[in-house]
Amino acid sequence: MVVLGIDPGLAHTGWGVIETRGSVSRARAYGCVTTAASEPMDQRLGKIYREISEVIETYHPTQLAIEKIFFGQNERSAIATAHARGAAIVACAQGGLTVGEYTPMQIKQAVVGTGSADKYQVMYMVRTVLALDHDPHPDHAADALAAAVCHVNLMRTVELTRKAASDEAIREADRAMMEERAARAREVTAAATAANIERDGKVGISARPSRISTRKAS
């Protein structure tokens, strides 16, 4: 599974590509799309779209993990981030990627184990999980890799949950089959017992007159 993680931002859109085989995940590449505040909005968004499209064409990810927007006090910044996020998602949609969206807290929880982790803890865990020999920079790229790691971890959890549910369904079906076989066996045994009782009763009735008639004859 090849996952593209994106940390959206109008000035800086971080991206990171990781590949997972079994339980092992490794970073294939990461970077950041940078746009200048002096550029018109359409050109900035177009650059994000083009460069993310180039990443997709180069590394062929099949799934996208992108951070959701956190609407804090700075509404203007959130709107700008939403524009950048939209441009990146369109590029991924054109590439046929399956989209997974996660809040910053979900990413921290999945990568570090706590939703209150700071950026240094996140960076350390990203470096450890992906077996990097350095801290990924810039921070936006590290956050993008963290989003990708979050996606992989949650997909594994979903897969294990489905497998457990499937295994339980199989065990339940086996139990039901065994119970049905046991019930049929009990029915057969009961029918055989009833038949034996009926046969023995008929034999007993026909034998008694014979003994009585023998005594009278003597």
Image (tube, rainbow, N blue to C red):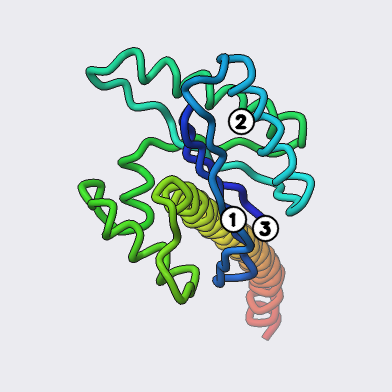
Identify the residue shown where x is 48% and y is 56%: 149
Instruction: Give the camera-side residue of 82 and 111.
Output: 82
Locate the N terminus and report the quarter of the image it occupies: bottom right
Alpha carbon of mark 3 to alpha carbon of mark 2: how far? 20 Å
**Badge nearest the viewer, 1 or 3:** 3
In the image, what residue type sits under mark 3? Met
In the shown orientation, is residue 130 left or right of residue 4? left
Q: Amino acid at mark 2?
A: Ala
Q: CA distance from mark 2 to mark 1?
A: 36 Å
Residue 157 on image: x %, y % = 48, 55
Give the residue pinned by disc 1: 166
Do callouts 3 and 2 mark residues in contact (Cβ within 8 Å)? no
Name which residue lies at 56% across and 67% down.
25
Whether residue 161 sits left or right of residue 191 in the image: it is left
Q: Earlier in the sequence, mark 1 or mark 3?
A: 3
Circle 1 Cα neighbour tier, 10 Å, few/some/many (<14 / 14–19 / ≥20) = few
Q: Which residue is mark 2?
A: 88
Q: Residues within 10 Å of mark 3 (few under 14, many from 20)?
A: few
Residue type for callout 1: Ser
Give the vertical position of 9 relative to 82 (above or below).
Answer: below
